[in-house]
Amino acid sequence: MIVVIGEILIDIFPSYQRIGGAPFNFAYHLKQLGFGVRFFTRVGDDDHGHRILDFMENRGFDAEDVQIDQRHPTGTVQVALDSNGVPHFDIRENVAYDHLSLESAMGSKAQDARMIYFGSLIQRSANGYGQVQEFLRSSTEQTTCFCDINMRPPHVNPRAIDDSLHRADILKVNEEELDDIRRRLGGPPSADPFVSWLMARYAISTLAITQGSRGSTIVSGDLPIHHLMSGRDDVVDTVGAGDGYAAILAAGHINRIPWETVIDQASVFAARICRIPGAIPDDEHFYDQPRLLMKGNANGR
Ligand SMILES: OC[C@H]1O[C@](O)(CO)[C@@H](O)[C@@H]1O
């Protein structure tokens, strides 16, 4: 079982609306790939919240894991796109997910999950920070903690970043986020020594760095593995590309697929997410190929 905690929200683009939020996007992909997933989140008792609940129930999520907040609205984000489809997010504050309670998750078997995914946006509020960190503290040693730092200034809580890095076994960041972390922490000024320093300081076993249309790098063990892209074509928007990448990374880790294969598949999947509006596809056949490719491998790691 993979346990995902965090926000779900409505991405409001200039001419369409999509369900989003990095934890939800991640959870959705893994569920479609055939993994057992529980997703703990919170929505408002409003039209957006009802739409989200209907959607999740239709796609087989457990509605009991979705709290309904009577006082705060469902999270929304205004998304503006530049000419390359790269988003600028204007994220509404004090919404339902900021008031998530993980009490029911802590009272269940969720701490025994094989993997827990968490991010940093939900930790912008004192409540979200406290809940996430308490949940992580109560997890067992066997659980892999997958942390996706989503720096969305000004929605950044520096203490949450530091604590989250301490909890992370697998860390996924983009290159701007890595720079931001470097500025906050100090450490070696150049890229490779900083990565080694960061991984040693926080006992991170695997670090993935996405570099937009230029590719990505996975560092796990001694050698970094690079994947170079030859640019992206047909981009609608890049919203959720990193979340798709993270989902394939998690699937590859769980099924012990060699990182060389994982990085290729994660890159292909992220590029496909860029060709659809928003972060998750409508077409259920979207997952046919990755579902086959990400099924364990006898020659795996
Ligand atoms: O963090 C806010 C934004 O990030 C995303 O999750 C994509 O990674 C969007 O769906 C959301 O609006």
Image (cartoon, helix red, strand yellow):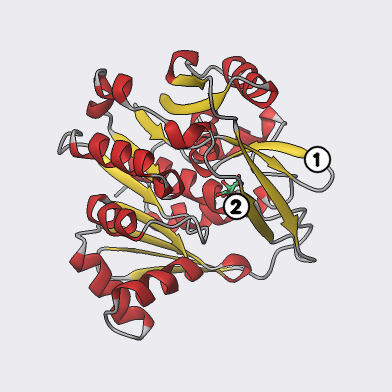
Using the image as rendered, state which of residue 47 and residue 208 is in the foreground.
47
Residue shown at 46% from the left, 66% from the top: 177
Q: Spatial distance from mark 2 to mark 1, Cα to Cα?
A: 18 Å
Residue shown at 48% from the left, 70% from the top: 175
The residue at which mark 2 appears reads as 241
User: Which residue in the rendered view is the most extreme toward the right?
Assistant: 15
- Disc nearest the viewer among 2 and 1: 1
Residue 64's x, y, as percent?
A: 44, 13
In which quarter of the view is residue 128 placed?
A: top left
User: Which residue in the rendered view is the most extreme toward the left?
Assistant: 141
115 displayed left or right of 238: left
Q: Is mark 2 within 8 Å of ligand 1?
A: yes
The quadrant the N terminus occupies is top left
The residue at which mark 1 appears reads as 16
Residue 231's x, y, as percent?
A: 68, 69
In which quarter of the view is residue 215 placed?
A: bottom right
232 displayed left or right of 95: right
Residue shown at 60% from the left, 19% from the top: 45
Residue 224's x, y, as percent?
A: 35, 70
Label 1 element class:
loop
Residue shown at 71% from the left, 51% from the top: 79
